[in-house]
Image: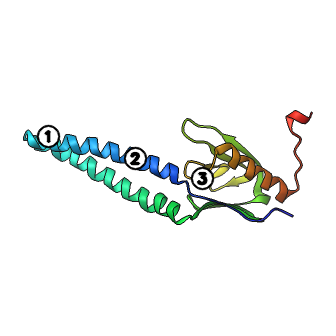
């Protein structure tokens, strides 16, 4: 019998970091657009103005899709007796369809790698980024792997015990 349902919320820390990066980038672009306008370079001001509008769009999108769910305490990743649900990308995987689970480290964040028993719409491997999931990447991986093992009745032998 698998353990109880585990729900991991969105990461507020990643939301703040993304917000800070976009605000800094937008301030530089806005400063450049205003400077160009003041020296009567309308073409340059227009070009940088378009970039500022694009960054504002990205900022709004990030606030709506990442920060508001984080502040509300919404679930980003859920583990239950049926499978794993990634609410960020709206991916649902059944435990019975998963061959194995791995962790792929990255420069800024890691990804869970689900090896499937068959080719799906996502391919034979499904990647779930942990950037917007609250917690340490290694801890999340261990939690997911242990849940998978319990749900499927798998007993792993650690390298330390051999």
Q: Badge 2 is on which residue?
A: 20
Mark 2 and mark 1: Cα distance apart in space = 24 Å
SS for dot 3: loop
Q: Badge 1 is on which residue?
A: 36
Is 2 on the left or on the right of 58, as rendered? right
Q: Badge 3 is on which residue?
A: 134
Q: Nearer the viewer, residue 94 or 134?
A: 134
The nearer-to-camera label among 3 and 1 is 3
State whether residue 116 appears in this view. no
| View extreme (left): residue | 40
Return the x and y of residue 47 as percentages of the image width and height.
21, 44
Return the x and y of residue 124 as percentages of the image width and height.
69, 49
Q: Nearer the viewer, residue 13 or 5?
A: 13
53 shown above or below 160: below
Q: Residue at x 64, y 44 (%)?
A: 137
Is 86 on the left or on the right of 82, as rendered? left
Q: Nearer the viewer, residue 96 or 31?
A: 31
The nearer-to-camera label among 2 and 1 is 2
State whether residue 10 appears in this view. yes
SS for dot 2: helix
Mark closer to the chain start, 2 or 1? 2
């Amino acid at each position: 019998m698998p353990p109880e349902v585990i729900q991991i919320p969105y990461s507020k820390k990643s939301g703040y970091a993304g917000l800070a990066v976009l605000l800094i980038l937008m301030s530089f672009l806005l400063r450049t657009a205003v400077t160009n306008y003041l020296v009567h370079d309308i073409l340059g001001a227009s070009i940088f103005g378009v970039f500022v509008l694009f960054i504002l769009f990205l900022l709004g999108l990030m606030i709506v899709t990442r920060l508001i769910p984080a502040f509300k305490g919404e679930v980003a990743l859920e583990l239950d007796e049926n499978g794993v649900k990634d609410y960020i990308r709206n991916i649902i995987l059944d435990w019975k369809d998963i061959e194995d689970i791995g962790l792929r480290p990255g420069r800024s964040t890691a990804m869970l790698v689900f090896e499937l028993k068959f080719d799906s719409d996502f391919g034979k491997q499904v990647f779930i980024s942990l950037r917007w999931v609250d917690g340490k990447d290694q801890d999340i991986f261990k939690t997911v792997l242990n849940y998978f093992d319990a749900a499927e009745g798998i007993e792993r032998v650690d390298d330390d015990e051999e």
